[in-house]
Image (cartoon, grey):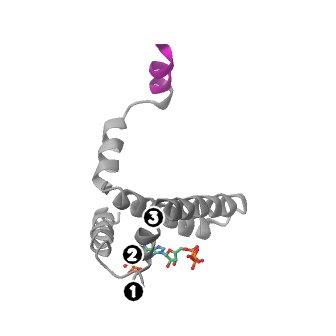
Amino acid sequence: MIDIEVLHRVANTLAERKEASPDSSYVSSLFHKGTDAICKKVAEEAAETIMAAKDKDLLHVVWEVTDVWFHTMVLLAHFGLSVDDVLAEFRRREGVSGIDEKKARTAG
Ligand SMILES: N=c1c2ncn([C@@H]3O[C@H](COP(=O)(O)OP(=O)(O)OP(=O)(O)O)[C@@H](O)[C@H]3O)c2ncn1[C@@H]1O[C@H](COP(=O)(O)O)[C@@H](O)[C@H]1O
């Protein structure tokens, strides 16, 4: 199993890019363009994931999901959120059936 620490290393690089010149860094250029540009990339990469899935192109599914994760990490960093916020939410949901959770949400 590959260590999840790679996500933290990339997240640390993203944080450093907040101080970098947009000319020298793709991530910095996204930070400078702002929320709309970052969200546009998330949407584009999600659409490309769907197209790869419909083509049953499994290599491209992995590439595009990586692009989605990466650009959502840029979005988190843009808002001062961290990978750990998402991992904590996964941990909070762990073992809670999606069916039971939805029932509890719609019961009241
Ligand atoms: N993991 C990534 C990563 N994944 C994808 N990408 C870039 O995300 C972009 C994806 O956009 P597209 O596939 O649409 O490619 P494109 O058509 O060239 O992009 P646009 O024309 O739409 O801008 C490409 O430019 C990829 O190179 C990434 N860029 C950077 N990282 C990580 O971020 C770190 C910092 O990157 P820089 O800030 O560029 O140094 C790197 O060391 C990596 O760890």
Q: Looking at the image, which residue sits at the far right?
A: 55
Residue at figure coordinates x 45%, y 26% from the top left: 101
Which region shows up in magenta? 100-108
CB of residue at label 2: within 8 Å of ligand 1?
A: yes
Q: Nearer the viewer, mark 3 or mark 2?
A: 3
Q: Residue at x 46, y 22 (%)?
A: 105
Q: Are marks 2 and 1 in contact (CB under 8 Å)?
A: yes
Q: Position of residue 28 (x, y in %)?
A: 39, 75
Circle 2: residue type: Ser
The residue type indicated by label 1 comes to: Ser
Residue wearing tag 1: 24
Depth-wise, is mark 3 or mark 1 nearer the camera?
3
Identify the residue at image location x=40%, y=64%: 74
Image x and y of residue 46, in percent: 59, 58
Residue 15, image quadrant: bottom left
Task: Check whether the beta carbons of the residues at disc 3 and disc 2 lie within 8 A of each other.
Answer: no
| Residue 29 on the magenta segment | no
Task: Classify the position of the N terminus by image quarter.
Answer: bottom left
Disc 3 residue type (three-letter): Gly
Cβ of disc 1 within 8 Å of ligand 1?
Answer: yes
- Local secondary structure at mark 2: helix
Residue 28's disc is 2
CA gap, disc 3 and disc 2:
10 Å
Residue carrying label 3 = 34
Disc 3 or 2, which lies upstream in sequence? 2
9 relative to 97, above or below:
below
